[in-house]
Amino acid sequence: MDTDADPVAPSDASSATSPPDNGQAPESTTPEPDRAGPAVVNTRRSGAEERASPPGDTLARLVRAVLPWPSRPHSPYEKLVRVHRSIHPKANLPLLHHAHHVAHKMHDGQVRRSGEPYISHPIAVARILAELGMDTTTLVAALLHDTVEDTTCTLEALRKDFGDSVAHLVDGVTKLDGVFFGASAEAETIRKLIIAAGEDVRVIVIKLADRLHNMRTLRFKSRPSQVRKAQATRDVLVPLADRLGIHVFKRELEDLVLATLDPEAYECIDRHVNAQPSRAGYLRTVMGELACELRAARVHATVTDRPRHYWSIYSDMQSSPSRQPHDMPRIVIRVAGDMTDCYAALGAVHGLYRPAPGRFKDFIATPKFNLYQSLHTTVIGPDNEPLEVLVRTEEMHHTAEYGVVAQYRGRDLSEPHEKAASSRTELDWLRRLLDWQRETSDSSEFLASLHSDLSSGQIQIFTSGGDQIMLPTGATPVDLAYAISTPTGDRLIGAYVNGRLATVTAMLDDGDVVEIISASGNDYPGPSREWLSAVRTPQAQRQINQWYDGRDADSGDGESGALTSKIQAGRLAVSMALRRRGRALAGDAPLINLARKLGYPDAEALFVAITETRLRAEEIAEQLIASVDRTAPDSADRA
Ligand code: MN
């Protein structure tokens, strides 16, 4: 259980308090005067404050201003309901109330390390998700997310009460038992999360909100565990937020990680940012001039200041020779029209201030892998001070902030739509992860591959057939071929990159158009061992190794070769059977115990028995799970 939290962190700056987006008059936003210290972390622009509001929001706000609100909500739960209703007016509130009731009852008597009742944590997590605009199903699952892990509540009970979707979401974020999985529990828990996300990406969104609240309240934990949590957040959850394009989460998580892992640097940046008294005046001047220029060009737009978050300043600091923080003023122009207005606005900006050469990037024509779109430019503003300007439509702004979850905001999605969500391009990497996790029975290998996949950037490659494939930075035509299919990889003999013949181990660049040349017929050389040192994707590495394993096994001596392959086949059958149940084979200890119980000397003998069909893999999987899972309490214990 996470006993490390305190009350809901101050996030009252919900959508209700953000300035109205009337989409025309440029607002002269001054930077907020004080930025909080490390304990609370830079909240000036995180989360709800910068949210673009769809037209419905503005209407709701108008209605609210006219009608007297019945009564001010007091409890954190009432506030959660209010936020949710303001974005989803037709929300199924009885269901939410029921989830709250069950969670309240199950966590009754549990206390967080802050001394607060435990229920404050799931409510805070649901509140974060409500502010993000997530649907009722997600909030219900968020309220219940720790019940299976930390209380006597069972998954089956949740399924009966709340249905399959909620049960699936709660199961996806439930940690695997350390008693069974031992040292690999953490890796297996992440693998389980990824598998569950393959079916419903909201699992990761809930996990991110859960971690965000735990990070906001990290100060109640011991120093070593603060550091562990912050590192795990940096290595896995921040990259996941980035892949899903949820920048409101990414920014705050990164700043919380920085405040925990390098408090001195955090304070240094904080001092630097706050020691620029002239900044506010400069920004006011620039925003005023830009607004005039845009009006003259007949572009309706909102001009706002968009300070960088501390982590972003920090990473530039790391690579700068002076190691001093530098924070270039930054402006975002949100045009009310479509993308042609973005280019018109850009023209106005460049007409007013001279652009710095080589700094213009067009992420509208070429969106980033997570669908981020904007025009980026750096110009020389008044007093020769450089200024960064981002130009985007309201819709692009919305996607930039919320990424994959933008589709849930203010919409009631039925099941078919939810399924459709995971077929979107931005989830390519997720499908890739799912593909190779299926082939990896070793959880530490899985986690290592996940880390390397998440830590590398992404490039977008176009195949000659016009398909787009996301690959990690530094990927080669070999990676591309194996990403297309295993036979394509095995038969690869050459590649055209942007129309020129290239070696198959050459590094590809973002946006390259690649044509794979495959050998035809039955006589082809197959992959070269040298490719192993060049490839960047785990699946290419695996497939090449498997090609050679297959050959070595063929040429091995008959008797022992046959036995080895029987053991391998049995092991594979068991891990596939476990995988079908959303579980995984981590260590061999439970297997050895089960083998002995069934009268076999060791796990190998058990695997051979499975291959020779004396035992069924499905039954072995069931028995393994039964031998380690907590016994389900009587359903009468439940709410
Ligand atoms: Mn939790």
Image (cartoon, grey):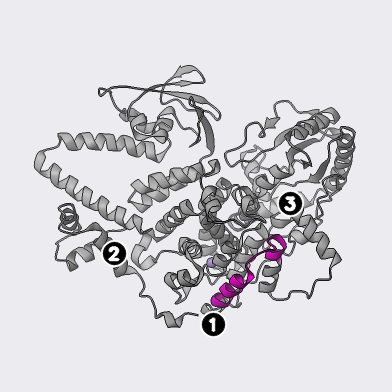
Q: Which residue is mark 1?
A: 109
Q: Amino acid at mark 2?
A: Glu
Examine the structure image and report whether residue 442 is included in the region drawn in magenta: no
Residue reaching furthest to the top: 500
Spatial separation of the CA atoms under disc 3 and disc 1: 41 Å
Residue placed under numbered mark 2 in the picture:
622
Give how far apart the Cα atoms at labels 2 and 1 are: 34 Å
Residue hosting label 3:
54
Q: Which residue is drawn at the image coordinates 59% and 74% (left, top)?
A: 100
* Image location (x, y in percent) of residue 230: 55, 57
Which comes sooner in the sequence, label 2 or label 1? Answer: 1
Q: At x 32% / y 34%, what residue is drawn?
A: 544
Q: Assign a secondary structure to mark 3.
A: loop
Asked whether residue 102 is drawn in magenta, I would say: yes
Q: Nearer the viewer, mark 3 or mark 1?
A: 3
Q: Which residues are magenta?
A: 83-103
Q: Quadrant of residue 603?
A: bottom left
Q: Earlier in the sequence, mark 3 or mark 2?
A: 3
- Mostly what secondary structure, the magenta segment? helix
Q: Position of residue 493 (x, y in %)?
A: 36, 22
Q: Nearer the viewer, mark 3 or mark 2?
A: 3
Q: Secondary structure at mark 2?
A: helix
Left or right: 196, with 296 as reference point:
left
Given the image, on which type of amino acid does mark 3 rest? Pro
Q: CA distance from mark 3 to mark 2?
A: 49 Å
| Residue type at numbered disc 1 | Gly
**Image side of residue 238 versus residue 282, left or right:** left
